[in-house]
Amino acid sequence: MASGAMISSGLFVLPGIAYAKAGPAVILSYLFASILIVPSALSQAELATAMPRAGGTYFYVERSLGSIWGLFGGLANWFSVALKSAFAIVGMAALIEVVLHEVFGVQIVQWHLKVFGVVCCLGFMAVNIVSVKHTSKFQIWLVGILLALLGFFVALGGGQTQAVLFKGFLDKGWFAIFATAGLVFVSFGGLTHVASITEEVKNPGRNLPLGMILAWAVVAFFYVAAIAVTVGLVEGEELSQSLMPISLAAGKYLGAAGFALLSLAAIAAFITTANGGLLAASRYPMAMSRDQLFPSVLGRISERFATPHLSILLTGAFMISAIAFLDLEVLVKTASTLMLILFILVNISVIIMRESRIQSYRPKFKSPLYPYIHILVILAYGALIVDMGWVPLSITAGFIVLSAAWYGFYVRRRVSRASAVMHIVERVTARELKTVTLENELRDILLERDDVIEDRFDRLIRDCHILDLKGKKDAEEVFQDVSKILAERLQSNEYVLFEKFLHREAEGGTVVQPGFAIPHIIVDGEHQFDVLLVRARDGITFRGASDPVRIMFVLAGSRDERNYHLRALMAIAQIAQEKDFEQRWLTARDTETLRNLVLLSTRKRDTNP
């Protein structure tokens, strides 16, 4: 999916336009663009493995920066991906027209191409509605054919290049090279679109980063190699005016057969882009409807095909309506500008999520060199955006205004989620903002991601009482508070429970390791069992213990639950042995974070009845 989304107009159409701006050094422009996408791809992979949900960039930006920026991110992503896919269909139709005219001498009128584009779009919509699995199989075959044809082109064309055509390599200057890198940046944008279908990827923690990295390596090589061969085969003046540069280059050393063969590769590329783009774009309205940013009807899933059919239909209709209104260079610059802004937001999201210190933010993959590479690439993207010109910037500003208007008109009354930014605000200002919604949502996402089947201990923890004590305490003082709480929950006498705790402590200390205690007692009755958690940052003094206790798991169960009593102790032992458990326990922001810390433990679940 990632490879197919990248190899299309960026390779088969844009090199001619880019050559006119940068000359032979367009090769460097593509190389720099491929390097610039890497930090964002790694950031996207981190966010996707932590939050494998439909919507990709939209979901991460909304959860980290808030609903209004999430709304802008979702609309901009949907717009750029859908229009890129629509352009791929138009490009395919135009390419077919040229091939039919050049090879077979057949002349096609303009409205025939429009009809052809609409029919193709309807076909892609049908494939996407039927199944993601079928879509991906279709994509794999097309990408395989495409890469084979490009390999053939590079291998044969490499030996035919003429050194004289590289003369004046840097005549346009480095500024033109970097500005052109911004223009062709859209060529690599498809790399991150695959994150929008993370929810439907098996084992996303492994497969998503690996797939993205491999796709980048393969596609970056083919982009740079194919464009270097093209520059070395086609005269500069001819190349700068061509909208079929790769096919033109193939025709130079293979004649009409080479032209037709690479045109076939271009058609395959346009099909993969249109198909994969529709798949990715259709997930944005679905994800936004789930979060009440769009009407809920767009989030409906087909009972028969298990795909978001209404979202696919809306996206397809948008693409069909856009097919007749495409201006190539302005479209490409606008798409690149939107993508650059979105990638800035993605890198900011990584910084926000990490600095929020939300304990349920646990990506399977972490982008390296944090935060230096993220800050550097944000500045680099900002510089590229400035070079895009006022038209793309005006359209982008229009999107921001549209997002703000829709937020005020529709979203504000329906959404009250707290973003990760609020966690940072709370940490900095030390205010009790009680923003636990995001943390609990991330917890549930992680449990689903890791296929965790909750056992009885998890259910007890979800319902248990948690004491978060301030100041130094004595063990007897804490046992009084614990007994009062458990007495109400177990329908028992608090004084009896208090005596049991004191008696149990006198029999043998319940401090199992420095700073960690597990007081446990047997209570009257049948089928009674409860857990209570205690955090004491300043410590609880236990007689006979040299270190103050800061972590306490209290167990109370009837005699018939003694077997489960031992199972609960085993669960606690596994939790206590997790890496950095004590540090996470002491730095947790509130009682709900403590609860999530235990629920997200990687212990072996006891799923036996």
Image (spheres, rainbow, N blue to C red):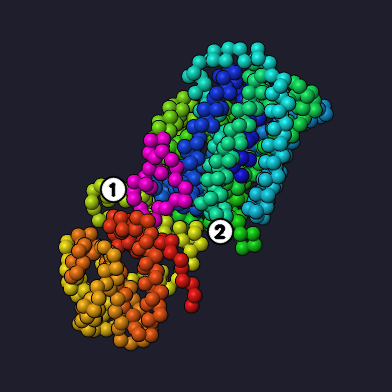
Who comes first in sequence, dot 2 or dot 1? 2
Q: Is residue 321 above or below residue 477?
A: above
Amino acid on which disc 1 is placed: Val
Residue most toward the bottom? 525
Amino acid on which disc 2 is placed: Arg
Q: Label 2, secondary structure: give it.
A: loop
Q: Is residue 173 above or below residue 387?
A: above
Task: Using the rendered view, name the quadrant where residue 216 is placed.
Answer: top right
Q: Residue at x 38, y 35 (%)?
A: 372
What is the spatial separation of the Cα atoms under label 2 and label 1, in whole angstroms? 35 Å
- Can residue 408 be seen by looking at this rendering? no
Residue 355 picture location, percent across and down: 34, 46
In the displayed structure, does residue 283 sit left or right of residue 11? left
Q: Which residues are magenta?
A: 348-374
In the displayed structure, does residue 308 sit left or right of residue 364? right
Q: Label 1, secondary structure: give it.
A: helix
Q: Observer-nearest residue: 172 or 123?
A: 172
- Can residue 219 be seen by looking at this rendering? yes
Residue 364 picture location, percent across and down: 47, 51
Q: Quick check: is 386 in the magenta stretch?
A: no
Which residue corresponds to mark 1?
A: 425
Residue 371 picture location, percent across and down: 38, 39
Q: Observer-nearest residue: 418 or 444?
A: 444
Q: Find residue 300 and name its label.
A: 2
Q: Residues within 10 Å of mark 2 (few under 14, many from 20)?
A: some
Q: Residue at x 54, y 37 (%)?
A: 189
Residue 5 picture location, percent across and down: 60, 40
Q: Residue at x 47, y 34 (%)?
A: 340
Which quadrant is the N terminus positioned in? top right
Q: Residue at x 44, y 31 (%)?
A: 381
Observer-side mark, 2 or 1, equals 1
